[in-house]
Amino acid sequence: MQMKRVLTGFLAAVCLLQASPLAAAPMPFPDMTHTWFRYREAADYLKNKDVLGGYPDGTFKPTATINRAELLKIVFKGRSDVVPVTRRCFSDVSPREWFAPYVCAAKNRGIVDGYSNGTFKPDEAVNFAEAIKIILNAYGHDVAETSGADWYKPYAAELERLELMPQHSYVPWAPLTRERAADLLWRVLRFEDERVIPRLSPGCNKGAPSMAPSSVQVNGIRRDFLLTVPGRYVSHDPAPLIVAFHGRTNSNSQVRSYMRLDREATDSIIAYPAAIQNSNGTYSWTDPGNKAYEIRDIAFFDAIVEKLSTDYCIDMDRISVAGHSLGAWMANSIACTRGGAVMASATVGGDTVITKCAGPAAAMIIHNPKDNLAPFSGAEQVRKLRTETNFCSWEMENSGPSELNCTTHKHCAGGSDVVFCPHTQDTDERGKFYPHTWPRSAGGFIADFFTSVK
């Protein structure tokens, strides 16, 4: 068992510390308030390079899908081979259209070839696979394309080989949103121009801070968290990050103790946020009336990740969330609203905000059917949502751990597996009937699950 350095805790001296200052990610467009901070960084970078612009009203519409013409514009904007055109390069691309120079430049370079009827369909939405092919070809990557339904796989493999974007973070045939188009192009441009590996956080090669952070400012309020860093942490080796959420009645120090993630996830930096305590002594992660995408403490999660990524060497493509009870609800909700940015979630005894997810994330869903505090139907809803988001089939296979009766959905996109575990452990550590319990072995299985996602 690897020993850890416990960097924060409920010590009186820690309570006297001021919240760590945080340089928040820029806000390049006013409608990106609820956007993942890395997508804001990407949009700001491209905007400053005059590659990306908003709409006439100043907005960016980050979650709207991007079409073929718009993508080619941001890919070719500012390149020397984009020149005015005087004739049609496709039957539906008039030289008078704003996008004609970019489309024709792409055709001249053999990057797009249109459809068999001579059209380009500039208004048609782009999916991830098409965008990856266009961007890699535009920047001179020689990829041998295959035929058939899997034509895109060599492009996805090249993107992963260069450590630009892991396959678990997107569904190849899913429509590409504007914020994710910016993120994809930002990753490629920074690699091409600066040889920056996008998964390495700004804290890499900086050395660990002399005093570990224990709080951040969120909307003007100090929010605290506990932090565990591996004893073997080195600043040039990116570490996975786990953010683990407590429930309605247990504090973050309590879940830190019984989740046992510190003992099992020995290569990960682990943060345990503290929810806001209600007047009756219970805890809450949200305010009444919050919409799914603006749950109050999603901003807290974002701030923790941003702060730790600045102070430590974090693998930004291996961020996971865990939770129990109400904390499971929070972790599941974050994995959905931050899908594509969060790699995976693992939860015990909780449901989710049922909504359209932003992208895929692997999921381990552990729930006792006899649970009388969190209905089992909530776990089934999470399962349905995540299998649909990850494009899994309903063909199952026994995958382990058998102790928790786990099975795995087959054929999930990009390896974002969904593991469903209707366990039968009915008693707590004192032998009292409590089917809402956190199974003693769950921490180890969750750590293994996070490691298994490729």
Image (cartoon, rainbow, N blue to C red):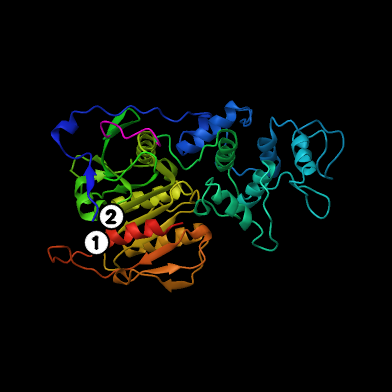
Q: Could you say which quadrant of the image residue 380 lies in?
A: bottom left
447 within the magenta span: no
443 and 288: which is toward the camera: 443
Q: Is residue 184 above or below residue 86?
A: below
Q: Residue furthest right?
A: 87
Residue 351 appearing in the image: no
Q: Is residue 341 above or below residue 194?
A: below
Residue under numbered circle 1: 436
CA neighbours of label 1 inside 10 A, class few (<14), some (14 to 19), many (20+): many
Which amino acid, mark 2? Ser
Segment tinted magenta in the rendering: 204-212
Which amino acid, mark 1? His
Residue under numbered circle 2: 325
> CB of mark 1 within 8 Å of CB of mark 2?
yes
On the image, the x and y values in percent for residue 102 come to 74, 37
173 and 202: which is toward the camera: 202
Please indicate whether residue 168 sits to the left or right of residue 442 in the image: right
Numbered-mark total = 2
Q: Secondary structure at mark 2?
A: loop
Q: Could you say which quadrant of the image residue 305 lies in?
A: top left
**CA–CA distance between discs 1 and 2?**
8 Å
133 and 72: which is toward the camera: 133
On the image, the x and y values in percent for residue 437 come to 22, 61
Q: Which quadrant is home to the N terminus?
A: bottom left
On the image, the x and y values in percent for residue 321 come to 36, 50
